[in-house]
Image (cartoon, helix red, strand yellow):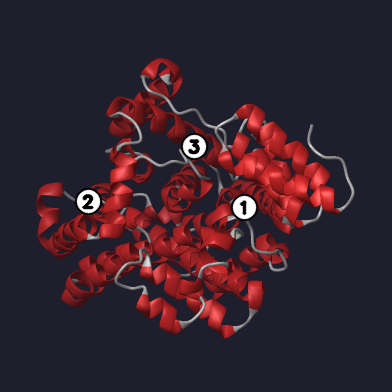
Amino acid sequence: MRALRPESRAGVLMWLALAVCAGYANVLGTPFQFDDYNVIVNEEQVHSWANWFAALDSGIRPLLKFSYTLNWTLGTGVAGFHVTNLLIHLANAYLVYCLAQAFTQQQWLRDSLRPVPLFTALLFAVHPVHTEAVSYICGRSASLMALFYLAALLSYVIGRSRDNRFYIYVATPLLFVLALAVKETAMTFPLALLLWELGCGGRWNTAFKPQWPVWAVSGIAVLFFIFSNSYFAQMQRSAEFNSLTGNLATHLYGFAWLLRQWALPLWLNIDPDLPLLTNFTGALWPLMLFLALFALMLACWRRRPWLGFALAWAMLQLIPLYLFLPRLDIANERQMYLAGWPLLLALSIELALWLNDRAFRLIAAAVLLTLVSLTVLRNQVYASEISLWQDTVQKSPHKARAHNNLGHAYLLAQRPQDARSEFSTALQLDPRLFQARHNLYRADDEMEMAGGALRP
């Protein structure tokens, strides 16, 4: 791989577009899946601009729903939704390139790091852990939020480097607001700015002055979420979900699982079967891993700041919010979409420092080819709802919801006998799963209409 000159933006976009097309061309014809029906296909709020506007006072994530409404009213069908997701992903890959370039320019070894920004962005473009955020249409909540989040960070970086007050005091907080309007987890942004300053040799006590508008927006957002009935009800349900100790143990386990998915993306799973823990008994190895990584982060911060920055960024994005507001789904791979790009940056920098030019190009080509292949294979799973949930059941055989969702897919495909088998398995795993019991009766009704056997 040859390092591109900073001014060769068209060349960078060309490489990134080729990478996105190579990894995701086979996803354009895939149908709506699972939650797509709940938030898009069967959701009247996104089917017209009048409905979207009418729901503004009570709805959540208005900008995300704006994007769904735009796609729906354009009438381009499911392919239009996929094209939008791919364009968002391409834009994010370019933002990663710009941020990687800005970061490496702050390092004392910057002359040795010229190929790093493009390689980092290409890794981001084709890493298979991102398929859930790109190929799964409603995974857009992660990628669209990341678009405004990364754009806000880049705006801040540009403003600081040029001493431009507009970028710092207007564009950055505005983009932060847009990120919040897509997904609430953008609340980590003020702390992300501090991490960037520290990773680039700055000091936290001098970083607050240019960041005060972002912290002000953050405070206003907290008040908005508390006084919004829709958001507050969700926060209440989340707060009652588990104890603080249980949340910490559970999400450290999820943190370790997500890092494994990033480092070794061979078992990607849209609905992983992760345990809900109430204490640290079942989370000793994730706790030890976290403590080891935390110690490594502190040890590397001065000599290898890219490693410290990458680990701190991943911890910030994956743990604090979910500690106090736990998720019903403990971990999803789409969480790595925003959390993982500094890890790719750190990997790229380490390879550039350890390898000569020729070896770097060979390793880079091999890694990119491997990741593209894994992404193409993963996207084949999205070919139908049946193939998606068959893959999930294979990887989460003891999760009742996965069997129920596969049964529902069979039911839609008019295969009631196969559907009944999956619903029965789901009820054996979780007798309280009322959706599976309701679906079992539906399957029996369809079999009766077709002249098949009834339940005993």
Tell me the tag on residue 361: 1
Q: Is residue 234 visible?
A: yes
Question: Is 258 in front, or is 154?
Answer: 258
x and y percentages locating residue 277 in the rendered image: 42, 25
Q: Amino acid at mark 3?
A: Leu
x and y percentages locating residue 78 in the rendered image: 65, 72
Q: Residue furthest right?
A: 451
Q: Are marks 1 and 2 in contact (CB under 8 Å)?
A: no
Which of pointers 3 and 1 lies earlier in the amino acid sequence?
A: 3
x and y percentages locating residue 221 in the rendered image: 21, 60
Between label 3 and label 2, give the one nearer the viewer: 3
Q: CA distance from mark 3 to mark 2?
A: 23 Å
Q: Please tell me whether mark 1 sits on a helix, a strand or a loop.
A: helix
- 291 on left or right of 377: left
Tell me the tag on residue 88: none
Which of pointers 1 and 2 lies earlier in the amino acid sequence?
A: 2
Residue hosting label 3: 259
Between label 3 and label 1, give the one nearer the viewer: 3
Which of pointers 3 and 2 lies earlier in the amino acid sequence?
A: 2
Q: Quadrant of the N terminus?
A: bottom right
Question: Is 420 in front, or is 210?
Answer: 420
Query: How many residues crowd mark 2 within 10 Å: few (<14), some (14–19), many (20+)?
Result: some
User: Which residue is rendered at x = 30% and y = 56% of the image?
Assistant: 231
x and y percentages locating residue 383 in the rendered image: 74, 58
Q: Please tell me whether mark 2 sits on a helix, a strand or a loop.
A: helix
Q: Amino acid at mark 2?
A: Leu
Q: Please tell me whether mark 3 sits on a helix, a strand or a loop.
A: helix
